[in-house]
Amino acid sequence: SLESIAKEFGFSVKKLAKYNEVPKDYPLEAGDIVYLEKKKKKAEKGYDFCIVRSGDSMHTIAQRYGIRLKNLYKMNKLPDDYTPSVGDTLRLRYDYKSTSSSTGQWSEPKISVCIFALHNFSLSDAEARK
């Protein structure tokens, strides 16, 4: 739960929920990405676009690429009630350059501020992954 992660890492639940743009009582599932600091305004270089996959929501895309949800909507000029459909292409950066390497295919971004496994995770596990 957000509460147990907040306690383990010395955060308030309110702050952790804010970083992850979810309510304080949000039910986490194994494999959810949880940020321990504020997310960025845009994705890292090289992640200019993403193609929506089955099961994606705007929130899961924002979490996957480490960007603020409101910025994802803003970059794509979408209303707050927009629901992505499989195959939609969403912009992840404001200042992208069209290159042959920017195919929009999903690959794992290099994000170091998140937790991929929620069960039995400890600070010593995080240190071992560096």
Image (cartoon, helix red, strand yellow):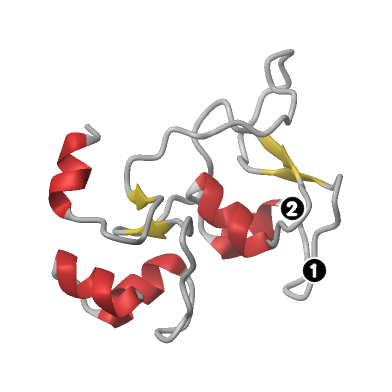
Q: Tell me what residue is drawn at x 60 percent, y 31 percent.
A: 107
Q: How many marks?
A: 2
Q: Tell me what residue is drawn at x 57 percent, y 62 percent.
A: 69
Q: Tell me what residue is drawn at x 25 percent, y 75 percent.
A: 4
Q: Quadrant of residue 85?
A: bottom right
Q: Nearer the viewer, mark 2 or mark 1?
A: 1
Label 2: state its secondary structure.
loop
Indicate the quadrant containing the N terminus: top left, top right, bottom left or bottom right.
bottom left
Please identify the residue farthest to the top as the structure is shown: 100
Precedes in sequence: disc 2 or disc 1: 2
Which residue position holds label 2?
A: 76
Q: Position of residue 33 (x, y in %)?
A: 45, 56
Q: Tell me what residue is drawn at x 74 percent, y 53 percent.
A: 76
Q: Position of residue 58 (x, y in %)?
A: 67, 61
Q: Please tell me how crowded label 1 is: few (under 14), some (14-19), or many (20+) other residues with Cα within 10 Å.
A: few
From the viewer's side, name the closer residue of 26 and 17.
Answer: 26
Q: Position of residue 108 (x, y in %)?
A: 54, 34
| Label pair 2/1, CB-CB below 8 angstroms | yes
Question: Against 95, is 122 above or below?
Answer: below
Please identify the residue farthest to the front as the structure is shown: 120
Q: Quadrant of residue 122?
A: bottom left
Q: Quadrant of residue 49?
A: top right
Residue 9, numbered circle: none
Question: Against 67, is 95 above or below?
Answer: above
Indicate the quadrant containing the C terminus: top left, top right, bottom left or bottom right.
top left
Which residue position holds label 1?
A: 82
Kind of residue indicated by mark 1: Tyr
Relative to 25, 6 lies left or right: left
Relative to 65, 118 lies left or right: left
Kind of residue indicated by mark 2: Asn
